[in-house]
């Protein structure tokens, strides 16, 4: 049985209400957490591409990515856990891992299950909750709850 049922969360994936690119964040992170993420991407064999200031580069160590961000360089890691589902990690600072997913790619139970598996893999590897909020909002709607060890809806379905 899936952690989340499409029927229970499909309103959170409505493009008109929530925008196309919800924010996903893992708070209270370190350079070591970023390195764990990079290691996870590699060990899972997820297709990925790294760029620095818009130029494709080899995927460096986390410390190098965070240092580049501290110098004001745009550091971006694109990860495809499966074809046609993209997560874009933007390195701003060490203290949080921020990324976007595209709701247009995440419609229906099958795609929701892919998202949940991705959030769970990251959350379990880091031992931290992974929270998804509507674009620019800050109030989490759903995510991987590390204490419960499962994906959960965090907002009230009644609004």
Image: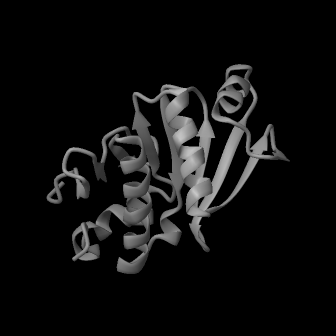
In this picture, residue 49 sits left or right of residue 54: left
- Give how far across and how far down residue 154 sits, in percent: 22, 50
Which residue is at 71% across, 29% downward? Answer: 64
Residue 137 rendering spot, x and y as whole percentages = 39, 41
Identity of the residue drawn at 80% across and 46% down: 58
The residue sitting at 52% across, 41% down in the picture is 36
Q: Quadrant of the N terminus?
A: bottom left
Query: On the rendered structure, is 102 left or right of 63?
Result: left
Quarter of the image with the C terminus in it? bottom left
Front residue of 64 and 80: 64
| Image location of residue 141, percent across then percent down | 29, 51
Choose between 63 and 119: the one closer to the eye.
Answer: 63
Residue 150 in the image: state x and y as whole percent.
25, 57
Residue furthest top in the image: 71
Scheme by which the image is coloured: one colour
31 left or right, relative to 64 = left
Q: How many marks?
A: 0
Instruction: Tell me where residue 157 sits by quadrant.
Output: bottom left
Residue 29 visible at all: yes
Task: Place residue 5 in its image quadrant.
Answer: bottom left
Q: Residue at x 32, y 43 (%)?
A: 129
Nearer to me, 100 or 59: 59
Furthest residue toward front: 43
Residue 141 seen in render: no
Relative vertical location of residue 2 with respect to residue 158 in this rendering, above or below: below
């Amino acid at each position: 049985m899936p952690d989340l049922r499409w029927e229970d969360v499909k309103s959170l994936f409505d493009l008109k209400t929530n925008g196309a690119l919800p924010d996903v964040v893992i708070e209270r992170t370190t350079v070591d957490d970023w390195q764990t993420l990079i290691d996870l991407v590699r060990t899972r064999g997820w297709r990925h591409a790294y760029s620095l200031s818009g130029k494709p580069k080899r995927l460096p160590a986390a410390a190098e990515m965070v240092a580049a961000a501290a110098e004001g360089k745009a550091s971006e890691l694109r990860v495809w856990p499966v074809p046609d589902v993209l997560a874009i990690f933007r390195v701003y600072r060490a203290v949080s891992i921020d990324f976007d997913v595209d709701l247009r790619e995440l419609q229906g139970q099958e795609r929701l299950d892919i998202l949940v598996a991705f959030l769970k893999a990251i959350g379990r590897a880091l031992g931290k909750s992974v929270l998804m909020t509507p674009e620019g909002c800050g109030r989490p709607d759903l995510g991987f709850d590390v204490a419960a060890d499962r994906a959960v809806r965090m907002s009230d379905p009644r609004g």
